[in-house]
Amino acid sequence: MKIAIVGFGAAAIGLLEKLKESSHEIHVFEKSKDVYSSSISGIRADGKLFVSTEMGGDIFIDPMLQKKLVDYYINFTDNKLVETGKSFGNHHYYKLFYEKGFLPISSDFYHIGTDQLKEVLFNIYNDFSSHPNIHFHFNYEVIDIDEEKNGAKINGDGLFDIAIITVGRSGHKLVNRMMSKFPKLVLDNTRVDMGIRFELPNHVVDEINKEMYEFKVKYRSKTGYMVRTFCNNPSGFVVTENYGDFLTVNGHAKMLEKSNNTNFAILTSLKFTEPFNDPIGYGSYIAKLSNLLAGEDKVILQTYSHFKESRRTKNLYRVLPTLDPKSFILGDVNLVFPRRIIESIIDFVENLDKVIPGVANNDNLVYAPEIKFYSNRLNNKSMQHIKFAGDCSGATRSIIYATAHGYLIGEAILTNQFSNAEL
């Protein structure tokens, strides 16, 4: 078969790994100019891999396959350096959080680091390139895919037996175009997570960082919203994330370079109801409003006490930001988010302080906005020759789950089950 893969990210890696020894002719189309600028090597991922059945996606991925894929990535590092942790393997911590109303999320963590992720991707690319049946086409943006009677056309040219779209969340323009053409694709498009990036000194969270590297908890706030932690980065760095027409905040950690602070996201989960059907538009609007207040290419930074009191921050005290000063302005996040989101975050922090004293210190830092967009949940049975894999499908939300999703679709191809695959 002649196979097209659109996008070279986590899902494509899983797919290629499964198919590289096959006789299928595979063409990978990637809009980035080279392997170093393709999506998985960007700052949006800091090489944090995990094994868990409680997070990462809405499909079941066998933990044994998850661990196999974690080892796969680690084996492509040059020196096998990895930081590990087990979230809530210790019953004492589980009980401590549970008693205060939190829902602890169990998982095993393996942190490669932003600084190693690019070399990992390059090494994987070199491996795939050594296989004569795999052909890479960089600097090639796919803007349209048509399903024909006997296959799929890419940008109206050439015919492939099947096409797998693996563009991640950054490929939302192509996915939106496909949804407009094929409305039956959409199963769900009602979710978005909005919140802040929280930064505090390492010494406040040293104990829990050493115990599990990343703690993940959910909490039903007094507003009714579910609030959760996301992407904890011990000794990490706060960064901005550019979506083209707006800027958000994010965080990452490196293997070799360390800071004095820990940062993590505090996100409020919003699930809208009919007739609303544009959560990405809503989140984008909030982000653009924040950028309007902060100025071009900047996010808002505020101390926690001023965040609670709806006062603009004008000076910092003991906690110094790891974000480049050129990338933020001291301001008031309350001018951006709806009050219910603010109240949910404050309720979360105040209760977290009961478990980890010092989390609610006045001079801890709040950055905004941090927004996690959920891709629309797509129906992979709606088309015979085209499937979606990874985060762009709405079925996954992590490197390992996306890689596994591609891997399983590759398995379906090898067993002639592609047309009927429900993944």
Image (cartoon, rainbow, N blue to C red):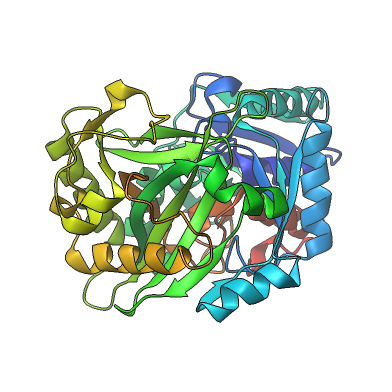
Quadrant showing the N terminus: top right
Q: Residue at x 29, y 61 (%)?
A: 279
* Residue 57 position within the rendered picture, expressed as x and y whole percent measured from the top left: 58, 63
| Residue 190 in sight | no
State the residue in front, 128 or 48. Answer: 48
* Residue 105 position within the rendered picture, expressed as x and y whole percent measured from the top left: 62, 68
Tell whether 225 sits left or right of 353: left
| Residue 22 in sight | yes
Tell whether 136 sits left or right of 292: right
In the figure, 123 relative to 384: above or below?
above
Quadrant showing the C terminus: bottom right
Q: Residue at x 66, y 72 (%)?
A: 94
* Residue 394 position within the rendered picture, expressed as x and y whole percent measured from the top left: 49, 60
* Residue 269 position within the rendered picture, expressed as x and y whole percent measured from the top left: 38, 67
In the figure, 270 relative to 29: above or below?
below
Q: Residue at x 70, y 48 (%)?
A: 210
State the residue in front, 236 or 110. Answer: 236
How many numbered circles are shown?
Answer: 0
Q: Residue at x 67, y 24 (%)?
A: 256
Quarter where residue 268 is shown:
bottom left
Tell whether 276 sits left or right of 373: left
State the residue in front, 138 or 383. Answer: 138
